[in-house]
Amino acid sequence: MADNRRDGPSFRDPPLTGAEVWLTGTLAELHAITAALGEAGAIAYQAPRRAMHGTDAGRYRQYLRLNIASAAPRQRHHARPDDSGGVLIDLDAARRRTA
């Protein structure tokens, strides 16, 4: 028997807020990344960890929803790929001063 229910928003569903993240890894990795993300913001929802099977046996997946305050955008400095953060000097002028 076919299910004719339409998939869509329901007034019973709470509004989704925050960033949504799917995690995949070992239990230790999921524990570590969840702790790190929790320090970056507030975990709004944490689904149960689900064991994976087959070639991914020993790994788990988990869904998280996070509330992380966004900071004001920083001004970007357009550095050249070879810029190591040093100060550029005029070599010709430096040579003239020492000559």
Image (cartoon, helix red, strand yellow):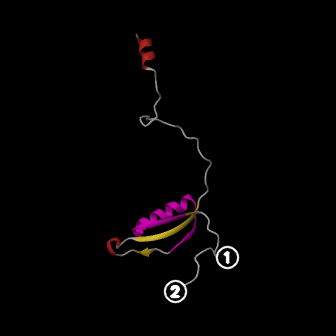
Residue 26 percent location from the top left of the image: 39, 68
Seen from the viewer's position, the closer of residues 32 and 64 is 64
Q: Amino acid at mark 1?
A: Phe
Q: Amino acid at mark 2?
A: Ala
Give the secondary structure at mark 2.
loop
Q: Which mark is on residue 3?
A: none
Please give the range of residues in magenta.
Answer: 20-47
Q: Is residue 36 above or below residue 9?
A: above
Q: Quadrant of residue 12?
A: bottom right
Q: CA distance from mark 1 to mark 2?
A: 24 Å
Most extreme residue toward the right is 11
Seen from the viewer's position, the closer of residues 44 and 38 is 44
Image quarter where the C terminus lies is top left
Q: Is residue 45 magenta?
A: yes
Q: Is residue 45 shown left or right of residue 99?
A: right
The residue wearing badge 2 is: 2
The mark nearer the N terminus, 1 or 2, is 2
Q: Residue at x 54, y 60 (%)?
A: 39
Most extreme residue toward the top is 99
Q: Which mark is on residue 11?
A: 1
Residue 22 percent location from the top left of the image: 48, 66
Q: Is residue 37 above or below residue 48?
A: above
Q: Quadrant of residue 66?
A: bottom right
Q: Residue at x 67, y 76 (%)?
A: 11
Q: Is residue 75 above or below residue 52?
A: above
**Mark toward the viewer: 1 or 2:** 2
Give the secondary structure at mark 1.
loop
Q: Residue at x 46, y 23 (%)?
A: 89
Most extreme residue toward the bottom is 1
Residue 50 percent location from the top left of the image: 44, 75
Residue 36 percent location from the top left of the image: 50, 60
